Image: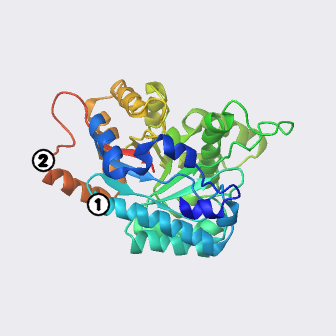
Amino acid sequence: MSFLSKHSTDGKAPFSDLFSKIPALTDLDVARIKLMDDKGVDTHVLVPLPWIDPVRKVAENEELALEACRICNEEMALAVSKHPSRFVGVGLLPLSCGGEVMMKSYHHAIHILGLSGVVLFLGPHSTPPDDVMYEKLYEECEYNETPIWIHPNRPPTFKDYTSTSASQYAIWNSLGWVYDTSVAMVHMAMSGVFQRYPNLKVVGHHGGGMVPFFTERFETQLSNFEGDGEKLLEDLKMFYCDTATFGYQPKNIQACLDFFEEGRVLFGTDTPMDMASPGYFTDTALRSVEALEVGREEKENVLAENALKFLGKAGDRLRECYKGAGLERAGGEGDLGVGLMMSKL
């Protein structure tokens, strides 16, 4: 925080006001673990917030961008080392200084610090995810079985209309973010990323955006306007998604289960960003899963097993932790228990 504050035009790091309102974002040792225990969650997969992008002085300077990511990722690795059964860490990468700088940060996060994935913040000002800049990253992530999270980064200053000064009514977030995630997913699928890297693991945050609901529209319009190419839309089913639908939305999650390939829906909530009512996202996501019109085994897979498989080596490590603690991740009667949850840091 202090590093970004130093280089910010107003002397304040992004989200600094928000951080002051959400102890669970910064106090992982006490506040975060208490929140997890209160909600019966075994493990949080910690995905960083879009720290760098708002501070353009940092984002566009190779040295500063690498330093910002190093600080963030080392803090993430420290949190995991202190609580290895409670946290899985995802690394932050610089995306505004070219592929070579991005890969330096990737190797530090994955091979030096041992983090379990990376996040790409993508939006209207970003380099598109089908740009050649990302090719080496996709190759390395498939080879190393490193999961990728896609998260939107559209700012509030991005206008709804050219005649307005900024976005209004929180449209930049409520609609803009799911749109941006969808755009990134379609660019990746249509450019053949999964044809070249069929074992690449990529999560489309916030329930896969609009993709589970609008794919037939994509197909129709591609046929109408662009001709060939619609067959690649099948590759959209190769994405993973989470259950972070911001409220009680069992029908949305059911649509994800129906659309994506088996085992690709992961329990996620965006906690602790539910600052108005702490724990609300976890409660409603859990109730949504419980209300799904599927069997108990599939519900338990969403709550834990799918993520354990998705995380690869980190999932294997967690299985050993759970086994040592006498935790069962599936089977039996009674209430469903949450194994892993995608959340924010």
Q: Where 318 sits versus 338, above or below?
A: below
CA separation in Å, label 2 and label 1:
20 Å
Q: Residue at x 44, y 47 (%)?
A: 25
Q: Residue at x 19, y 51 (%)?
A: 322
Foreground disc of the pair 2, 1 = 1
Whole-percent x, y for residue 41 in the image: 29, 41
Residue neighbourhood size for the residue with mark 2, other residues' Cα within 10 Å, grouped as few (<14), some (14–19), many (≥20) = few
**Snapshot quadrant of residue 73:** bottom left
In the image, taking residue 182 as reference, residue 252 lies left or right, namely left
Q: Residue at x 32, y 52 (%)?
A: 29
**Snapshot quadrant of residue 4:** bottom right
Residue 136 visible within the image:
no
Residue located beneath label 2 in the image: 326
Q: Which mark is residue 82?
A: 1
Whole-percent x, y for residue 323 in the image: 15, 52
In the image, taking residue 26 as reference, residue 135 lies left or right, namely right
